[in-house]
Amino acid sequence: MINYIDILPEIKAALDKNKAVVALESTIISHGMPYPENLTCAKNCEAAIREKGAVPATIAILDGRIKIGLTDDELQRLATANDVIKCSRRDVPYAISAGKNGAATVSATMIMSSLAGIRFFATGGVGGVHRGAEDSMDISADLTELYTTDVCVVSAGVKSILDIERTLEFLETQGVPVVAYGQDEFPAFYTRNSGFKAPLRLDTPGEVAKMMKAKWELSLKGGAIIGNPIPEEFSMPKEEIDNAIDSALQKATANGITGKEITPFLLSEIKAITKGRSLDANMQLVYANARLAAEIAVEYHS
């Protein structure tokens, strides 16, 4: 792996000592938020993980090298560059071989975390089955990664722009544990409630760590989704966010926007419709997920 991967010394030392490390994706920096909010969010996530006793590892590809952990200068570069590829599983070999800069999606972050030996990962929302997938076949690579790669993903559920019912059904078919943290209903990113009950509920970091330990010690491949609801004070009304999503989807359809471009487009449109409140909610839910992932990782490695 030395031919492809650079690991920051602090992270390497933590991994060698079996200490808690939490991965962070980089697509949220390059494609999910505008500058300078993206840089602020990235740094605050790393600080939240440290406050809970774990080591943060923001993951990206820079100049064809997998970076497990980014320096301040590299975070700044990623937050301001306009030549960053949005990298899913299929894009990783190209970005490396061509010497490109790549922001890691959930699936790519899971792959690179696993290569480095990192078991826990905090993100905003996981991808899933898109609305209208019965015609478009648009299903995120995040879902297939979840049943093949041994990384536990803490998110605010799946993105509200998706078909949540079909996403949960897909995950059930593939045997991926789907947990609602601290409530019965599966969260829906901007809002705590999706209208769908989660298959599982756990209420403490220790319970999650115990479940993951049992899963992996039994050699049951794959990860899990821990759906951590957005903090109540930042949760947006379900009807309001649903209306914003519907409007953004109609505009995407009218403009022929599909594939990997659709999620950044929809997030930008929803931000405009909600006059920026969705961006603040997005940042707050990511911080909450970073804290919870760190707590789970510390329990797992204790």
Image (cartoon, grey):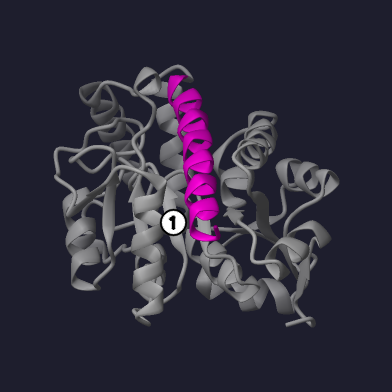
Quadrant in the rendering for residue 240: top left
**Which residue ends up furthest to the front in the rendered image?**
302
Q: Nearer the viewer, residue 281 or 260?
A: 281
Q: Could one spot residue 76 in this view of the protein?
A: yes
Q: Where does residue 129 sit, x and y in percent of width and height?
A: 27, 58
Q: Which residue is found at the position 34% from the left and 79% from the top?
A: 220
Is 46 on the left-hand or right-hand side of 289? right
Q: Nearer the viewer, residue 86 or 255?
A: 86
Q: Where does residue 194 sit, x and y in percent of width and height?
A: 20, 38
Is 27 on the left-hand or right-hand side of 216? right
Q: Nearer the viewer, residue 179 or 173?
A: 179
Q: Which residue is found at the position 32% from the left and 57% from the top?
A: 128
Tell me the SS state at disc 1. strand
Is 41 on the left-hand or right-hand side of 134? right
Quadrant in the rendering for residue 153: bottom left
Q: Where does residue 30 sit, x and y in percent of width and height?
A: 64, 46
Is 196 on the left-hand or right-hand side of 177? left
Q: How many marks?
A: 1
Looking at the rendering, in which quadrant would you find the N terminus? bottom right
Within 10 Å of disc 1 (Cα), the crowding (few <14, some 14-19, many 20+) is many
Task: Reply yes or no: does residue 169 show up in magenta.
Answer: no
Looking at the rendering, in which quadrant would you find the C terminus? bottom right
Q: Where does residue 215 sit, x and y in percent of width and height?
A: 34, 72
The span shown in magenta is: 277-302
Amino acid on which disc 1 is placed = Val
Q: Which residue is found at the position 40% from the left and 77% from the top?
A: 217
- Looking at the image, residue 24 lies above or below residue 140: above
Specify the principal SS of the magenta part. helix
Q: Could one spot residue 140 in this view of the protein?
A: no
Residue holding disc 1: 153
Q: Nearer the viewer, residue 278 or 5?
A: 5
